[in-house]
Amino acid sequence: MRKDITYISGVPVEKAIQIVENCFFQEEETELTERVVRNAEEFREAYLTMLPYRRFEECLDRFHAAAGRERFSYEGRCAVCNCKQPFIVDYRFAVEEEGRKIPNWRERLVCPNCGCNSRQRFMIQKIFEEYRPGKKILLYEQNSEVYRKVIRELDNVIGFEYIGESAQPHPECDGIIFEDISALNYEDEEFDLLVSNDVFEHTTDYQGAFKEAWRVLKPGGKLLFTVPFNGNDDQTEKRVEMGENGKICTAQEWYHTSPIPGGEPLLVCQIFGWDILDLMKECGFCNACGKVYYGIKDGYLGYLPLYFEACK
């Protein structure tokens, strides 16, 4: 962004963003787009294809930095509320680049009405798209906005929380179901759709967890999930190993907040690479792929957001 441009002087940041958006894109380019990726090379090709979106984000970063505000809004269409909303953006979970804070677009862009961030809104939209009357859905979460929004709209939805293999639930967790993702207490072929948002990274036995997911899915069923992922790495980075006395960290400890009140933080045991797709096939899935997505109108930003789809 050129510093000598003065025609947006005095224009509110939100309006300036709309000006830049109209300069960058045609109307159809602001709609949700998805692209299948199966390896590091295809991921890099997707990066180059979607480079204009990256440049758009850089403009947003600089606009907000110049405004000097800790909180701002981005107008977009919320798939949960089915209407336009002023999504909230701040510097929570931000990273620094060249001395400038960069918003975590994937974890922010929070809808002020339903309370869901960009990642959550997108996954709820996918659940709504996949649902048909009579389908049974299992969510790998229960004490979350995603679960609460889905059960209000759809029937036959079950959820649970995973807090580690040996962790004990907090007394304040009445009504919450707890499951070991490597040994689920559900019948074979019980569900049509499984959805897991950043859960599989918290067990060293992720192969067992994928096998369990395959077991409880009906033929033709689908698993949608997100995990910490390095799109440029072919191999999963294992950050934790099992020793005689429990887990031993082989990299700097990284924790996710517990999904339950008062719960212990959950250790991230690995950052997945593209070998995850071969593992899914070894566990029985007939087809598995990654999908990068982006949607300016819907407020699905962050470079590059990605989720996985595996079919039985």
Image (cartoon, rainbow, N blue to C red):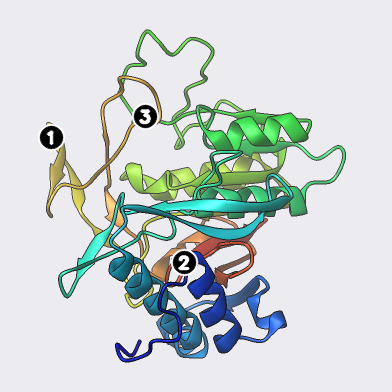
Residue 290, given in percent of the width and then of the height, sits at 53, 69
Q: Evaluate if marks 1 and 3 touch, with contact meaning CB atoms under 8 Å apart.
A: no
Q: Nearer the viewer, mark 1 or mark 2?
A: 2
Residue 201, given in percent of the width and then of the height, sits at 36, 48
Q: Nearer the viewer, mark 3 or mark 2?
A: 2
Q: Indicate the secondary structure of the residue bearing disc 1.
A: loop
- Decide: is 279 above or below 8: above
Q: Which mark is residue 12?
A: 2
Q: Earlier in the sequence, mark 3 or mark 2?
A: 2
Q: Determine the CA span between mark 1 and mark 2.
A: 59 Å
- Decide: is 236 above or below 5: above
Amino acid residing under circle 3: Ile
Structural crowding at the residue carrying mark 3, measured as other residues with C-alpha within 10 Å and reported as few (<14), some (14–19) or many (≥20): many
- Decide: is 238 above or below 31: above
Q: Determine the CA span between mark 1 and mark 3.
A: 21 Å
Q: Evaluate if marks 1 and 2 touch, with contact meaning CB atoms under 8 Å apart.
A: no
Q: Which mark is residue 163?
A: 3
Q: Which residue is mark 1?
A: 244
Taking depth in this image into account, of 73 and 271 the one nearest to the observer is 73
Amino acid residing under circle 1: Glu
Residue 90, given in percent of the width and then of the height, sits at 36, 52
Q: Earlier in the sequence, mark 1 or mark 2?
A: 2
Q: Indicate the secondary structure of the residue bearing disc 2.
A: loop
Q: Indicate the secondary structure of the residue bearing disc 3.
A: loop
Residue 209, given in percent of the width and then of the height, sits at 46, 43
Residue 208 visible in rendering: yes
Structural crowding at the residue carrying mark 1, measured as other residues with C-alpha within 10 Å and reported as few (<14), some (14–19) or many (≥20): few
Q: Earlier in the sequence, mark 1 or mark 3?
A: 3
Taking depth in this image into account, of 33 and 93 the one nearest to the observer is 93
